[in-house]
Amino acid sequence: MFDRLLDAPLAGEYSENVSATTTTEVAVALSTAPAATKVQAVTTAFAPPAEDSLPEGDYGKMIRLGERIFKETGKYAPRYVGNGLNCVNCHLDSGRKPDSAPLWAAFVHYPAYRSKTGKVDTLASRIQGCFAFSMNGKAPLQGDEIMTALQTYAFWLATGAPVGKPMLGSGYPKLKKAAQPDYARGEKVYMQNCALCHGTDGQGQRTGNIQVFPPLWGPKSFNWGAGMHQLANAAGFIQANMPLGKGGTLSEQDAWDVAMFMNSHERPQDPRFTGSIEATRKKYHDTDDSMYGRIVNGHVLGSP
């Protein structure tokens, strides 16, 4: 069954509530349709299946394995993780929470063209990228049980989700820039709202071998190729979700400022590094959203 699942473009074969239209067709339609005929966004909240509603048998076991990998990635996928993060650190509530790039929305979004890779990515290649960049590790091969489990978990979470329609709560919120993000203001916001959990040094908190709160910069955090290093992504995530349990309490300007502060610290090198900071920035980071290659406090970010 899992071979069928991974070979299927989407979940139409398995759920009466999911359109049978392939995601390739949807991607083409969305990218080529005139503005007036674009698919209308879903404006009602989507609810994934309840945690206690797992199906029986091998299918349910694979879903459960995917959930465990998602929540404790370093424990269940240690060969592919090179830092102190878990998938759930950026995709809250086990990939369920709206506005934190929920997994159910990702499943029905792919295949899709991504400017980051310059090609149409599948959900599988998107997950592989997360391991390489956000986990600062290496990508599992497509046939690896890790990939099967994560895709099966995503498929199950997306039960009943509409295909080909932008979903309420997908991805991270897109904030408007109220003013130029500022390091000094961001440091103040960080110390007042973030340091309690993530530490004044940004290295998070550990209890034994368990990473309780994730490191936000430094050698055990995501690398310079991860999406969270981009100011817009970080600001949207922070404003909607942080401090943990108090999402929406920071102003949008505070979120921009603390995103600037967080991403103005050193972290592991971008795996796509060309051998030159300048060339790598020009090729992969030539945007106002990236601090890579910029000088902060006398240090060129991304340099050894």
Image (cartoon, rainbow, N blue to C red):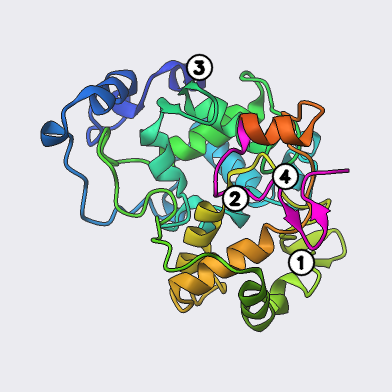
Question: Considering only order in the chain, which callout, 2 or 4, is on the residue closer to the N terminus?
Answer: 2
Mark 2 or 3, nearer chain start: 3
- List the residue tagged with mark 4: 293
The residue mark sitting in front, 4 or 3, is 4
How many other residues sit within 10 Å of disc 4, few (<14), some (14-19) or many (≥20)? Answer: many
Residues shaded magenta: 284-304
Q: Quadrant of the C terminus?
A: top right
Q: Which residue is mark 3?
A: 3
- Residue 228: numbered disc: 2
Q: Residue drawn at (38%, 49%), measured in percent from left and top?
A: 170
Disc 1 residue crowd, few under 14, some 14–19, many 20+, Cα 10 Å = many
Residue 244 percent coordinates (x, y): 56, 72
- Going from N to C along the chain, the mark reached first, 3 or 1, is 3
**Vertically, is 295 above or below 2?**
below
Look at discs 3 and 1 and give the one toward the viewer.
Answer: 1
Q: Disc 1 versus disc 2: distance between alpha carbons?
A: 15 Å
The CA distance from mark 2 to mark 3 is 32 Å
The tag earlier along the polypeptide, 1 or 2, is 1
Looking at marks 4 and 1 on the same chain, the residue that comes earlier in the sequence is marked by 1
Above or below: residue 252 compared with residue 222: below
Residue 16 at x, y percent in the picture? 23, 32
Badge 1 marks a residue whose secondary structure is loop
Residue 13, image quadrant? top left
Q: Is disc 3 placed on a helix, strand or loop?
A: helix
Q: Residue at x 62, y 38 (%)?
A: 285
Main secondary structure along the magenta-highlighted residues: loop
Residue type, label 1: Gly
